[in-house]
Amino acid sequence: MRIRERVTALTVAAVTVLTLASTQLAGVASADDVYGEYTVGGKIEEAYTATGGPDKWGNPLIAESPALQGGRFQTFEKNVSFYWKANVAGGTAHFVGGAIRGKWASLRYERGVLGWPLTNEIDVPGRGKRQNFQGGNVYYSSAGGTRTVWGGILARWSAKGGSTGFFGFPVSDEYRNGRGWAQDFNGGTLFFP
Protein backbone atom coordinates (compact mmCIF):
# COMPACT_ATOMS: atom_id res chain seq x y z
CA MET A 1 0.00 0.00 0.00
CA ARG A 2 2.79 2.41 0.87
CA ILE A 3 4.43 1.83 -2.51
CA ARG A 4 1.20 2.70 -4.30
CA GLU A 5 0.86 5.90 -2.19
CA ARG A 6 4.45 6.88 -3.00
CA VAL A 7 3.95 6.25 -6.74
CA THR A 8 0.76 8.35 -6.68
CA ALA A 9 2.51 11.15 -4.78
CA LEU A 10 5.46 11.07 -7.21
CA THR A 11 3.09 11.12 -10.20
CA VAL A 12 1.21 14.14 -8.81
CA ALA A 13 4.52 15.91 -8.11
CA ALA A 14 5.82 15.17 -11.63
CA VAL A 15 2.62 16.45 -13.26
CA THR A 16 2.79 19.61 -11.15
CA VAL A 17 6.43 20.24 -12.12
CA LEU A 18 5.70 19.66 -15.81
CA THR A 19 2.66 21.96 -15.70
CA LEU A 20 4.67 24.75 -14.07
CA ALA A 21 7.54 24.27 -16.52
CA SER A 22 5.25 24.40 -19.55
CA THR A 23 3.65 27.60 -18.22
CA GLN A 24 7.09 29.19 -17.91
CA LEU A 25 8.09 28.08 -21.41
CA ALA A 26 4.86 29.38 -22.93
CA GLY A 27 5.34 32.80 -21.34
CA VAL A 28 2.80 35.10 -19.86
CA ALA A 29 0.13 36.53 -22.11
CA SER A 30 0.52 40.24 -22.70
CA ALA A 31 -2.00 42.52 -21.08
CA ASP A 32 -4.36 44.67 -23.06
CA ASP A 33 -3.26 48.28 -23.43
CA VAL A 34 -5.37 51.31 -22.58
CA TYR A 35 -5.74 54.05 -25.20
CA GLY A 36 -7.89 56.95 -24.05
CA GLU A 37 -10.91 55.53 -22.24
CA TYR A 38 -10.84 51.99 -23.64
CA THR A 39 -8.56 48.98 -23.81
CA VAL A 40 -7.41 47.44 -27.06
CA GLY A 41 -6.32 43.82 -26.92
CA GLY A 42 -5.68 40.56 -28.67
CA LYS A 43 -5.64 40.32 -32.45
CA ILE A 44 -7.25 43.74 -32.81
CA GLU A 45 -4.43 45.32 -30.82
CA GLU A 46 -1.85 43.44 -32.91
CA ALA A 47 -3.32 44.86 -36.12
CA TYR A 48 -3.91 48.31 -34.60
CA THR A 49 -0.32 48.76 -33.47
CA ALA A 50 1.21 47.10 -36.57
CA THR A 51 -0.61 49.51 -38.90
CA GLY A 52 0.06 52.76 -37.05
CA GLY A 53 -1.69 52.65 -33.67
CA PRO A 54 -3.00 55.82 -32.05
CA ASP A 55 -0.91 58.15 -34.24
CA LYS A 56 -2.63 56.88 -37.40
CA TRP A 57 -6.05 55.70 -36.15
CA GLY A 58 -6.64 57.69 -32.97
CA ASN A 59 -8.00 56.22 -29.77
CA PRO A 60 -10.88 53.73 -29.59
CA LEU A 61 -14.39 55.19 -29.48
CA ILE A 62 -15.92 52.01 -28.04
CA ALA A 63 -14.86 48.89 -26.19
CA GLU A 64 -14.15 45.81 -28.27
CA SER A 65 -17.61 44.50 -29.22
CA PRO A 66 -19.19 41.29 -30.50
CA ALA A 67 -19.72 40.89 -34.24
CA LEU A 68 -21.39 38.20 -36.36
CA GLN A 69 -20.75 34.54 -35.48
CA GLY A 70 -18.22 35.05 -32.72
CA GLY A 71 -16.18 37.78 -34.39
CA ARG A 72 -15.11 41.03 -32.76
CA PHE A 73 -14.73 44.65 -33.80
CA GLN A 74 -13.63 47.99 -32.40
CA THR A 75 -14.14 51.49 -33.81
CA PHE A 76 -11.52 54.25 -33.61
CA GLU A 77 -11.48 58.06 -33.85
CA LYS A 78 -10.24 58.42 -37.42
CA ASN A 79 -13.17 56.77 -39.27
CA VAL A 80 -11.83 53.23 -39.05
CA SER A 81 -12.83 49.96 -37.42
CA PHE A 82 -10.82 46.80 -36.93
CA TYR A 83 -12.60 43.48 -37.49
CA TRP A 84 -11.48 40.02 -36.41
CA LYS A 85 -12.87 36.51 -36.66
CA ALA A 86 -10.81 33.45 -35.75
CA ASN A 87 -11.53 31.41 -38.90
CA VAL A 88 -11.28 34.28 -41.43
CA ALA A 89 -8.03 35.50 -43.02
CA GLY A 90 -5.90 33.21 -40.86
CA GLY A 91 -7.25 34.80 -37.68
CA THR A 92 -5.75 38.21 -38.51
CA ALA A 93 -7.67 41.40 -37.73
CA HIS A 94 -8.06 43.94 -40.56
CA PHE A 95 -8.96 47.60 -40.61
CA VAL A 96 -11.76 48.98 -42.77
CA GLY A 97 -11.89 52.76 -43.07
CA GLY A 98 -12.96 55.85 -44.96
CA ALA A 99 -14.99 55.56 -48.16
CA ILE A 100 -14.46 51.80 -48.34
CA ARG A 101 -15.92 51.44 -44.84
CA GLY A 102 -18.88 53.60 -45.90
CA LYS A 103 -19.60 51.32 -48.87
CA TRP A 104 -19.21 48.19 -46.75
CA ALA A 105 -21.56 49.71 -44.15
CA SER A 106 -24.18 50.38 -46.84
CA LEU A 107 -24.04 46.65 -47.61
CA ARG A 108 -24.55 45.68 -43.91
CA TYR A 109 -20.92 45.22 -42.82
CA GLU A 110 -19.92 41.58 -42.14
CA ARG A 111 -23.61 40.59 -42.13
CA GLY A 112 -24.04 41.52 -45.80
CA VAL A 113 -22.99 40.01 -49.11
CA LEU A 114 -19.35 41.07 -48.76
CA GLY A 115 -18.83 39.31 -45.44
CA TRP A 116 -15.59 39.76 -43.51
CA PRO A 117 -12.49 41.69 -44.66
CA LEU A 118 -9.68 39.48 -45.96
CA THR A 119 -7.08 42.25 -46.33
CA ASN A 120 -6.36 45.74 -45.14
CA GLU A 121 -6.86 48.57 -47.63
CA ILE A 122 -4.35 48.21 -50.46
CA ASP A 123 -2.95 51.07 -52.56
CA VAL A 124 -3.13 50.58 -56.32
CA PRO A 125 -0.43 53.05 -57.43
CA GLY A 126 -1.74 55.86 -59.60
CA ARG A 127 -5.28 54.48 -59.59
CA GLY A 128 -6.81 54.30 -56.12
CA LYS A 129 -7.38 51.81 -53.33
CA ARG A 130 -8.97 48.40 -52.92
CA GLN A 131 -9.92 46.03 -50.15
CA ASN A 132 -10.76 42.33 -50.49
CA PHE A 133 -13.70 40.77 -48.64
CA GLN A 134 -15.11 37.23 -48.57
CA GLY A 135 -17.84 38.06 -51.10
CA GLY A 136 -16.05 40.50 -53.41
CA ASN A 137 -13.88 43.59 -53.41
CA VAL A 138 -14.44 47.30 -52.80
CA TYR A 139 -12.53 49.85 -54.89
CA TYR A 140 -12.08 53.58 -54.42
CA SER A 141 -10.81 56.16 -56.89
CA SER A 142 -11.34 59.91 -57.06
CA ALA A 143 -12.72 59.54 -60.61
CA GLY A 144 -15.04 56.58 -60.04
CA GLY A 145 -16.00 56.85 -56.37
CA THR A 146 -16.40 53.78 -54.20
CA ARG A 147 -17.57 50.67 -56.07
CA THR A 148 -18.11 47.00 -55.34
CA VAL A 149 -17.02 44.29 -57.79
CA TRP A 150 -18.11 40.71 -57.13
CA GLY A 151 -19.36 37.44 -58.57
CA GLY A 152 -19.11 36.66 -62.27
CA ILE A 153 -18.08 40.19 -63.21
CA LEU A 154 -15.22 40.08 -60.67
CA ALA A 155 -14.05 36.78 -62.19
CA ARG A 156 -14.10 38.18 -65.75
CA TRP A 157 -12.51 41.46 -64.77
CA SER A 158 -9.75 39.70 -62.77
CA ALA A 159 -9.03 37.42 -65.75
CA LYS A 160 -8.47 40.57 -67.84
CA GLY A 161 -6.01 42.12 -65.38
CA GLY A 162 -8.36 43.65 -62.80
CA SER A 163 -7.69 47.23 -61.72
CA THR A 164 -4.27 47.33 -63.42
CA GLY A 165 -5.52 45.77 -66.67
CA PHE A 166 -7.26 47.18 -69.74
CA PHE A 167 -10.57 47.87 -68.00
CA GLY A 168 -9.02 49.72 -65.04
CA PHE A 169 -11.08 50.83 -62.06
CA PRO A 170 -14.87 50.49 -61.79
CA VAL A 171 -16.89 53.67 -62.38
CA SER A 172 -20.30 52.15 -61.56
CA ASP A 173 -21.69 49.44 -59.39
CA GLU A 174 -23.15 46.33 -61.01
CA TYR A 175 -26.53 46.94 -62.65
CA ARG A 176 -29.24 44.92 -64.40
CA ASN A 177 -28.86 44.54 -68.17
CA GLY A 178 -31.62 42.50 -69.75
CA ARG A 179 -31.39 39.03 -68.25
CA GLY A 180 -27.88 39.56 -66.94
CA TRP A 181 -25.68 42.06 -65.21
CA ALA A 182 -23.26 44.75 -66.36
CA GLN A 183 -20.67 47.01 -64.76
CA ASP A 184 -18.84 50.02 -66.19
CA PHE A 185 -15.09 50.47 -65.85
CA ASN A 186 -12.66 53.16 -67.06
CA GLY A 187 -11.89 51.03 -70.12
CA GLY A 188 -15.40 49.77 -70.99
CA THR A 189 -18.28 47.64 -69.77
CA LEU A 190 -18.23 44.00 -68.67
CA PHE A 191 -21.32 41.75 -68.82
CA PHE A 192 -22.34 38.60 -66.98
CA PRO A 193 -23.38 36.04 -67.94
Image (cartoon, rainbow, N blue to C red):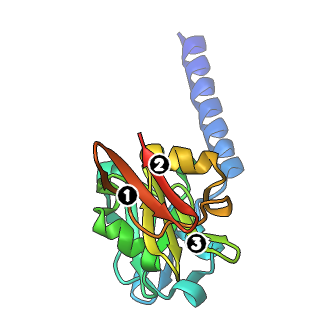
Q: Could you tell me if residue 160 is visible in this image?
A: yes
**Going 35% across and 49% down the picture, which residue do you hit?**
181
N-term mark: 2 or 3: 3
Observer-side mark, 2 or 3, equals 2
Observer-side mark, 1 or 3, equals 1
Q: Secondary structure at mark 2?
A: helix
Q: Which residue is mark 3?
A: 129
Label for residue 174? 1
State the separation of the CA atoms marked 2 and 3.
19 Å
State the separation of the CA atoms marked 1 and 2.
8 Å
Q: Position of residue 169 (x, y in %)?
A: 56, 67
**Residue 63 falls in image quadrant:** bottom left
Q: Position of residue 188 (x, y in %)?
A: 53, 61
Q: Which residue is mark 2?
A: 153
Residue type of the residue flagged with mark 3:
Lys
Q: Are marks 1 and 2 in contact (CB under 8 Å)?
A: yes
Residue type of the residue flagged with mark 1:
Glu
Asked if residue 121 is positioned above or below residue 133 in the image, the reply reads: below
